[in-house]
Amino acid sequence: MTTTPYLLTIAGHDPTGGAGLTADLATWSALGWRGASITTALTAQNSYGVQAVQAADVAVLRSSLHTLLADGEPAAIKIGMLGNAAVAEDVAQFVESRQCPVVWDPVLAASDGTPLWTQAHGGGLAMRLAHRADLITPNRVEASALLDLPTWDMGPPPAAWIAAIRSRWLEAGAPHRAVLVKGGHAWGAHSTDWFVSNSTVLPLVSRRLPRSAHGSGCVHASVCTARLAEGWSVLDAATEAQLRVHAGIDQAITIGPGRPNTRTDAQPNSDDLPWQPLPGQPEDAPPEFSRLTGHLGFYPVVPDADWVLRLLEWGVCTIQLRIKNADGAALRMQIRAAVQAAQEVPGTQLFINDHWREALDVGAYGVHLGQDDVHTADLAALRAAGLRLGLSTHTPAEIARAHALRPSYIALGPVFPTTLKVMPYRPLGLERLTAWRRWLSPRYPVVAIGGIGLNQMQEVRATGVSGAAVVSAVTQAINPRLAVREALHIWPACADEAVAQAMV
C-alpha cells in the first residue's frame, strides 16, 4: 500500500484561520502539499487578538499523534504553540522518535503581544525541542525570552546571542541545522532576519512594510517545513519563506476591524525579494547596474571570438563569450577582437564570462559572473564604467545574493539536465522556472540556462523568461547556421524583434 506524502502541523487552532494549524494547512495547500494537523490548544480570538487559550487534553493528543502514524510517517513536521508543559512534553517525545525534518516555531505570544503559556517552553523542554529541530524560527522577543538575553534593535546579533544560540540550541557537528531570528519586531527601514548556523551568520533583508499581519510567523515556518521536506537546504527554505511572508503581509486579507491575516496564497514578485548582502556590504541595497538596451531572446554561449564573429554575421544580437582554454595575451586578444566586432553592430549585447578585468579594460558591453566570482570582482568599478552585469543563480539563497547586487539580469538554471558538465543542483523544470521568474518580475530580466535545446525553446519561452542561453545547441550542431536560423525564428532578440526577424 502506498500513501500520499503529507506534512504534519502540531499547533494551536485559530478560529479566524489566520494563524496556527489552519494557516499551516492553507499554506501547504497553496504549495501543493497535503497537510495533517494535531491540535495542541483551542483559542478564542478575533482580529483584535487572543482572549482565551485552553490546552488540549494530553491523553487525546497522545492518541491522535500515534493514531495518525497508521497512515504513514510525515515528510516533515512543524511545531507551533504548545499550550502547556504537559502538551510540550508529549510533543517532544513524539518528534524525538521521528526521522523527518522538524521546524520549531516557538510561539510564546500572539502577534498582538498576548502571552500564550510561556511556561510550556521553558527549561529542558525548550532545549529538547531545539536539539531535535532542523530549523528554529523565533522572532527577537521570543528568542530573547528563551535565551534569557536582552533584545537588540538594529545591526547584527551581539556576540552573546551567537554564542548562546550555538551552545544551547545548535549541537556541534550539525551543519544542516540553523536558527532564524526574525526581524519584524526590530526598528529601521529594513526588516532583517538573521540566519545562524554553527559555521555562518547571514542577514536576509527585506523592505519593511508599513503594517504587520496576523499569522506571519506561522506562514513562515510552514513554508520552511514544505521546502525542507523537498530536500532544500535550511537557508534556501528560509529565503523562500521570507519572500512569501513579505508578499503575504503586503497582500493581507481583512477579516475584521483589527489586524488583517497574512495571505497564505500570496503571489510574490520582485518587490518582495529578500537580499543577502555580501560580507562587509551594508544592509542598504547598492545602486543598480545599468539596464539592458535590448531584448535577450536567443542567447548563445560560445567559446572563442571566431564564434562571436560568425554569430554576428548570422544576425545574433545577444551573445556570451565564455573562454576556458586561453590566458594572458591570447585571452586579451580574443576578448578585444570580440568586443570590437560587437561594437560595430548596433544593438549587440556581448557579455564576457568571468574575465571581468579584461572586459573592463576594453569597454565591453557587459560581464556575466557566477556566485563565487562576485567575491573577487571589482563590482563598483564595473558599475561605474557602465558595464551590464548578469549573474548565475540556482537556488533561492543565490537569488537573494544576486538581488543584493542589483544586476542587469539574473540567470536561472539548470532548467533541464545538462550534458556538458555535472551540476551540483537539481534541474528546476518548467514549473519552478515559471514560479521563480515571477519572483524576479518586473525588476529583472530572467535568462533560462541549462540543458536547453532548440526543441525545448518554445516551451521555455512560454514560462515568461526574457531569454534562453544555449551552449551545445549551437556549438555542437551539425549545421550551426541552420540551428541559429531556427532559434531566431522561435525567439528573436535585438532591440527590436522585427529587426532580428528581418536578419534571418
Image (cartoon, rainbow, N blue to C red):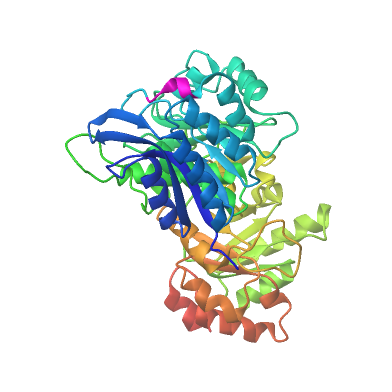
**Magenta: predominant secondary structure element?**
helix
From the viewer's side, name the closer residue of 323 and 169: 169
Q: Point out the residue furthest to the front here.
A: 59
Classify 75 as above or below 14: below
Foreground of the two, 148 or 322: 148
User: Looking at this view, is 412 or 129 the one in front?
Assistant: 129
Residue 207's x, y, as percent? 40, 36
Asked if one can make out residue 129 in the rendered structure from this viewpoint, the answer is: yes
Point out the stretch of residues depicted in magenta.
116-120
Q: Position of residue 407 (x, y in %)?
A: 53, 48
Q: Is residue 117 magenta?
A: yes
Left or right for 444, reference 397: left
Say whether residue 424 is magenta: no
Residue at screen point 54% across, 79% down: 488
* Residue 258: percent from left, percent from top: 20, 34
Image point (82%, 54%), residue name: 329
Q: Is residue 430 left or right of residue 175?
A: left
Q: Residue furthest left?
A: 257
Looking at the rendering, which quadrant does residue 173 occupy?
top right
